[in-house]
């Protein structure tokens, strides 16, 4: 799994110009799932993003997690994170999991994040054409690949 975490002041998702989800201070998490991803990847990534200390403490130092600052999380599936650009100019998405594999992993990831956070999260809609609006705070953007967790 690959996740792009963006610390945001606010973020929202719309589908066909209709609001789907929105958050205030927190994390926008774009997640790309590949065929080889396991429940271990799901749980590790969920714990990592909830506990990652990327919010400012009283001294202005990034030392507080989204969980500790009562921030919100918006999770959006994005298969294009699995793009390979090694050959040519057209990305290959061969590593991206097919929907029958990706949807259950995506749903388990949402459930795992909610369990670690101890409150609900907002989501996009798997496979939909979504428009995402965000105000990146910092800017802080972090890429996490579960294949590099050791």
Image: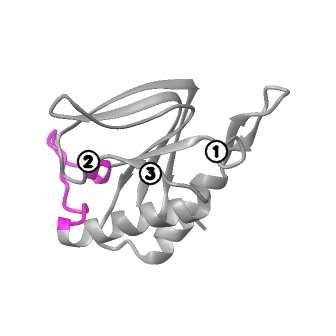
Q: Mark 3 points at which residue?
A: 3
Callout in the foreground (1, 2): 1
Instruction: Tell me the element at label 1.
Output: loop
Observer able to see residue 51: yes
Left or right: residue 94 versus residue 142 is: left
Image location of residue 136, percent across then percent down: 50, 26
At label 2, counting other C-alpha atoms closer than 10 Å, the crowd grade (few under 14, some 14-19, many 20 or more) is: some
Between 10 and 93, the one nearer to me in the picture: 10
Instruction: Tell me the element at label 3.
Output: strand
Residue at image position (19%, 71%) is 100
Picture quarter with the N terminus: bottom left
55 w.r.t. 125: above or below: above
Q: Name the residue under label 1.
A: 66
Residue at image position (60%, 57%) is 117
Give how far apart the Cα atoms at labels 3 and 2 are. Answer: 11 Å
Residue at image position (52%, 60%) is 114
The residue segment tinted magenta is 77-99
Image location of residue 2, percent across then percent down: 42, 55
Is most of the magenta stretch helix, strand or loop? loop
Mark 1 and mark 3 in contact (Cβ < 8 Å)? Answer: no
Q: Mark 2 points at which residue?
A: 80
Give how far apart the Cα atoms at labels 1 and 2 are. Answer: 25 Å
Left or right: residue 124 versus residue 44 is: left
Colour pattern of the rendering: one colour
């Amino acid at each position: 799994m690959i996740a792009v975490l963006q610390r945001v002041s606010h973020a929202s998702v719309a589908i066909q110009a209709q609001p789907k989800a929105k958050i205030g201070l927190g994390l926008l998490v774009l997640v790309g799932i590949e065929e080889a991803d396991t429940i271990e990847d799901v749980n590790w990534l969920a714990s990592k993003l909830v506990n990652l200390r990327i919010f400012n403490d009283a001294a202005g130092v990034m030392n507080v997690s989204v969980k500790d600052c009562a921030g919100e999380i918006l999770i959006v599936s994005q298969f294009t994170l699995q793009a390979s650009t090694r050959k040519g100019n057209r990305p290959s998405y061969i590593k991206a999991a097919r929907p029958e594999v990706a949807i259950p992993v995506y749903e388990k990831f949402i459930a795992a994040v909610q369990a670690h956070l101890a409150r609900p999260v907002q989501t996009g809609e798997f496979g939909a054409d979504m428009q995402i609006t965000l105000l990146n705070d910092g800017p802080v953007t972090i890429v996490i690949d579960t294949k590099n967790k050791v």
